[in-house]
Amino acid sequence: MEQTKPLFETVVRPHRSLNAFGFRLLMAVLIFANGVFAIAMMLRGAWPVVGFLGLDVLGVYIAFRLSYAQTRAFERIAIVDNALVVAQVDERGRSRVWQCPSYWASVGYDEDSDERGVLTVGSQGKRVEIGRFLHRKEREQLARQLRAALLQSRTYEAAP
């Protein structure tokens, strides 16, 4: 069976401003600074402080690892074979797929309900939120692109 090329396709992923190198550098600086402070505390006789400094580093490490685990989540939004398909995959790999005929699909953007706005797609009374990872401007841009792609798909469907 031949795969049809999508008329529109985008993948939305969470953004993290600190890459892997930056994370390693941050952890190295934190460990070095805590090590220097630990030596100073041991020389003053306050050796119990050293254990708490280790917990500090462990806490920062765990927080960043949990944050990076969330980057495995993504949303794939596509218009394929006259259908709008939204596949949402969470950080654990569990996926949820929603689809509807692209001819009946609508895009909604409510900028007042949330500080970043809420972007939804829907058809026949059912709606699904998309673009939760995006900032306000990116959601607005995705809404415009998706509306244009849906309009384009409708003109292809109407053509003989």
Image: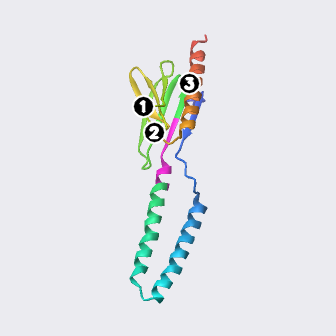
Kind of residue at disc 1: Val
Asked if the residues shown at circle 3 and circle 2 are in contact, with their CB atoms under 8 angstroms apart, the answer is no
Instruction: Give the residue pinned by disc 2.
Output: 88
Kind of residue at disc 2: Gln
Which numbered marker is on residue 128? 1
Judged by depth in the image, the label closer to the viewer, 2 or 1, is 1
Tell me what residue is drawn at x 56 percent, y 66 percent: 26
Instruction: Tell me if I can see residue 132 in this picture.
Output: yes
In the rendered image, residue 75 lying in the magenta stretch gets the answer yes
Question: Image height check: is 39 above or below 139?
Answer: below
Instruction: Tell me if I can see residue 6 in this picture.
Output: no
* Bounds of the magenta segment: 68-76
Tell me what residue is drawn at x 58 percent, y 53 percent: 17
Q: Position of residue 158 (x, y in %)?
A: 57, 12
Tell me what residue is drawn at x 44 percent, y 36 percent: 114
Whichever of labels 3 and 2 marks the residue nearer the N terminus, that label is: 2
Depth order, front residue of 28/99: 28
